[in-house]
Amino acid sequence: MPRQSTPWPLAGRLGARIRELRLEANMSLRELAEKSGLAQGHLSDIENGRVNVQVQTLAAAADGIGVDLLDLLNYGDQSTSERARFVELSRRLTPKQIERETAKFERMLRRLAKRKKLKGSKRKASKRCSMPA
C-alpha cells in the first residue's frame, strides 16, 4: 500500500489501537513482526496511520498480538456494550487473576443455581400440599 505523509484519522486511530494492544502484551515491534509475518517497517507505518490496511493484514496483526480481530476495532473509548467493557477490563488481568476471578464467578453461579432450585422445589411442594377446591 502507498505510504501517506499525513495520517488518515481512522487509520491513525486503528494504528494507535494496535500499538496499545501490542504494548499491553509487552511486545516489541520486532516481536510482533516475527509472530505476525508482517514486515516491521509496515507495522510501524500501520501504527502511525500512514497506510490503508487490508483485512488480512489486520488479522495477521491480531493473531500476532494474540487478540481477536474485533479487539482491534474496539477502541475502548466507545461503550458498545457491557460485554465489550468486560472484555476490555479482563484483558488487563494476569492469568492468575483470571483464574481466581473465574473461580469466584463459578461459585457465585452455583449459589444462584442452588437458590433457584430451592425456590422451585418450594413452589412444587406448596402446590402438592394445597387441596383443590
Image (cartoon, helix red, strand yellow):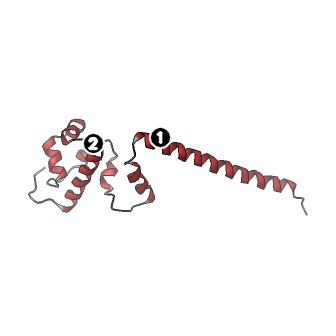
From the viewer's perspective, is 107 left or right of 8?
A: right
Question: Which residue does the numbered mark 2 point to in the structure image?
Answer: 26
Q: In terms of depth relative to the viewer, which is nearer, 36 or 57?
A: 36
Task: Name the N-terminal-most of marks 2 and 1.
Answer: 2
Q: Secondary structure under badge 1?
A: helix
Amino acid carrying mark 2 in the image: Asn
The residue located at (59%, 48%) in the rendering is 109
Q: In terms of depth relative to the viewer, which is nearer, 57 or 31?
A: 31
Residue 118: percent from left, percent from top:
72, 50
From the viewer's perspective, is 59 left or right of 7?
A: right
Q: Is residue 28 above or below residue 76?
A: above
Q: How far apart are labels 2 and 1 at the CA level?
A: 20 Å
How busy is the neighbourhood of tag 1: few (under 14 within 10 Å), some, or many (20 plus)? Answer: few
Q: Secondary structure under badge 2?
A: loop
Question: Which residue does the numbered mark 1 point to in the structure image?
Answer: 99
The residue located at (19%, 42%) in the rendering is 29
Residue 21: percent from left, percent from top:
29, 48
Instruction: Please state, as top left, top right, bottom left or bottom right, where the C terminus lies in the image.
Output: bottom right
- As drawn, the residue found furthest toward the top would be 34
